[in-house]
Amino acid sequence: MIKAPTSEKSRMIRFAIVGAIGTVVDFGIFNLLINFTSIEPIGASVISFGCAVINNFILNRTWTFPDARKKKFLAQLLQFAIVSMIGLIIRTPIFSFSEKVYTSLANKWLPNYAINPEKLGYNLGLATAIVIVMIWNFIVNKYWTFNESK
């Protein structure tokens, strides 16, 4: 296994922490929307994704990749937004497909009184989509959006 320099390990840990915070933002807003509004799950997923993207851009720019702030803010925000929109394009069909599969399995195997199979399916679908898109986001943002980092 190739060992990354200590500063690169620190950067990876910070990126993961920002991702975890973004995931909490994503799940929190998603669940607020599906539980307290009439917004459909896919719409709630798009809104929660947007909130997480804004959160992650600010934290990554200021904390994970502070040396990449040499780039103009708006140019970097545009790059981050492009990567995120492609991530959303990847995420939406994954979420749509996987939440149906998970909901179906939960309806089949779990009693309704123990846990709501539909909400479990939504959350497992969202988790699946987040993990896949996180890989895309890390690779592209590291080498394109925040590439001025040493």
Image (tube, rainbow, N blue to C red):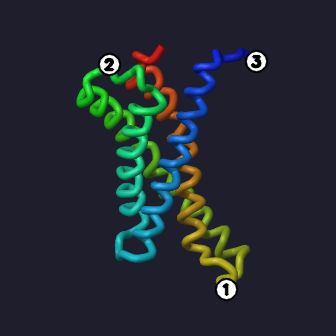
Mark drawn on residue 60: none
Q: Pointer 2: residues within 10 angstroms few (<14), some, or many (20+)?
A: few
Q: CA distance from mark 2 to mark 1?
A: 54 Å
Q: Amino acid at mark 1?
A: Tyr
- Relative horizontal placement of residue 89, taking residue 11 as reference (left or right): left
Labels in figure, total: 3
Residue 36 place in picture, x, y as percent? 40, 77
- Relative horizontal placement of residue 41, taking residue 10 as reference (left or right): left
Tell me if label 2 and label 1 are in contact, CB under 8 Å.
no
Q: CA distance from mark 3 to mark 2?
A: 32 Å
Residue drawn at x 35%, y 41% is 85
Q: Say above or below: 122 vs 26.
A: below
Residue that sits furthest to the bottom in the current view? 113
Q: Which residue is mark 3?
A: 1
Helix or strand or loop: what does disc 1 sit on?
loop
Mark drawn on residue 113: 1
Helix or strand or loop: what does disc 3 sit on?
loop
Q: Amino acid at mark 3?
A: Met
Residue 35 place in picture, x, y as percent? 45, 75
The residue mark sitting in front, 2 or 1, is: 2
- Relative horizontal placement of residue 150, taking residue 1 as reference (left or right): left
Residue drawn at x 32%, y 37% is 81
Residue that sits furthest to the right in the current view? 1
Residue 11 place in picture, x, y as percent? 55, 27
